[in-house]
Image (cartoon, rainbow, N blue to C red):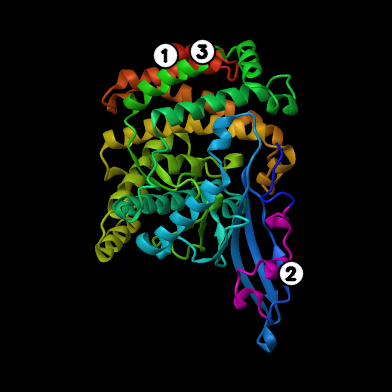
Amino acid sequence: MTINLLPLGQKPLNEFTLEDFREQRVLGETYLGSDITGVKNNASMGSGHSISGILYFTGQGNGYGAVDRRLFAKQLLPTVDHSDTYKVGREPYVLYFRELQALKTVSVGVGTDLTFPFVAQDDTRLIFFQRYARAKSDADRLTEMTHPIARKRVAYAGHRSIACLNARLRTRKYCFHDSLLVDKFSVDKKSADIVDYFETWRLYSSDYSREEIVNLTANGMKKVLDELKLKNLESDVSILVGEGWKALEFLSEPGHGDMRAHHVIGPEETRADRPKQRKFIDWDRFGLYPNVLSHVTYSSMEGGLAEIPLDEICGLGGRVLAYDKAASNNDAKIRNRSLRNLDKMSHKKVIASVKSSLKNKFAVQYLALAIEDHMHLQSSSLRWPRNQLAGLISGIPGWSLEKMVNTRPQKIVEILDFVAQNKKLLNSMDDPVGARKYFARLGDKLIQAELVDVPETVLSRLK
């Protein structure tokens, strides 16, 4: 995939020097004054449509000690891809102004404790800046840890903060302009997304080169997909999602939209019973989503570092729902007292405070969305250049590009097997038969497309 910068020939954010920032003329004296003598630019390609990272403006401070002033910066970029669905969903001007609107609304109307303060914007180059604290992302924190129990503790603290965020966004929904409250989980939208995942995964797993795939015409694409056993894909997926989404009872609410562990930023924990609220970056996907999705995407970090074991998903649901309820009160004193009370309770007591039927429903929705997200990340891993992917796994012990591509199909099979062995979870749904059919039909379609190898014993238990 090639990246076209706006305007043509413009220097990308990750190559900006101190002189470039001065010529840009959007940052003030705090970052570009006479006491600033250099900038360490850690921005990089974080996805197929943006460059982002931390900028460290440094100097001697006019005799008052060393200066280290930090900004988070992000630049939106257009993409070139074989898929119109992929390109339309990543139109740079739309994402740029959506993110700015969401960021400013959250900061002003929902809570300054949830975002970093906005500093400046450059609408010509599609770059904006936020003040950045001396804090690590959960992804960095998890990567540095070697003990699984320590990682799990960080992950559960992250889920706690996400639950509090989701509750606050929901109760302050009135703060957001209607243009932001777009349903990103409509049947049509998700059908198009899942078709794109199927097609991209299958195309890039075939013998066709990256260049051949990007340059396929519409007729050529249809012919190739038919050859690759993806006939009737759009109609099959439309039925799958249309009937399955209803049975899975998804309810869309205001959400971040892309809650990866590297988007969750927070200070070190000082006491186990007083978790610190995290802040969140990268709001370009803001819209209406099932709140379960944030917990799925947070757990999906490469290397499985933020992964919650499948047999603990119901327990995760108990914690999430308990903290969501506590954080839903608009009275700050009552809200904070309720959260402190939960923080003092044991893990088991927090989980036990939520009805089993609600925890089971959370688990079913989580597992369905986890399969979809594995498909999403698998298609992204295949469509992005290897040098870009290498940056996403840097520092993760024992992880490689090969594992990155080979692990997610295996995870999908594990989820289908888990659901097949725990069909009682489905009984908490209003339509357990419809929910079961969703997993069975999706498994069938993945096998038909030759994307995963699901044992027949697994599918037979789902049917």
Tell which circle, 2 or 1, labels the residue nearer the N-terminal end. 2
Which residue occupies 48% across, 36% down? 309
Q: Which span is picked out in magenta?
A: 10-33
Q: Amino acid at mark 1?
A: Arg
Q: Which residue is mark 1?
A: 461
**x and y percent of residue 275 in the render?**
42, 60
Per the image, label 2 sits on a secondary structure element best described as helix
Front of the two marks 2 and 3: 2
Image: 120 above or below 99: below
Rate crowding at label 3 as few (under 14), some (14 to 19) or many (20 or more) other CA atoms within 10 Å: few
Q: Which residue is mark 2?
A: 19
Quarter of the image for residue 140 reads: bottom right
The residues bearing labels 3 and 1 have C-alpha atoms spaced at a distance of: 25 Å
Foreground pick, 457 / 31: 31
Q: Amino acid at mark 3?
A: Asn
In the image, residue 15 lies in the stretch drawn in magenta = yes
Tell which circle, 2 or 3, labels the residue nearer the N-terminal end. 2
Rate crowding at label 2 as few (under 14), some (14 to 19) or many (20 or more) other CA atoms within 10 Å: few
Confirm or deny contact between disc 2 and disc 3 (CB under 8 A).
no
Q: Which residue is mark 3?
A: 232
**x and y percent of residue 244 in the render?**
37, 23
Q: Amino acid at mark 2?
A: Glu
Q: Is residue 397 left or right of residue 284?
A: right
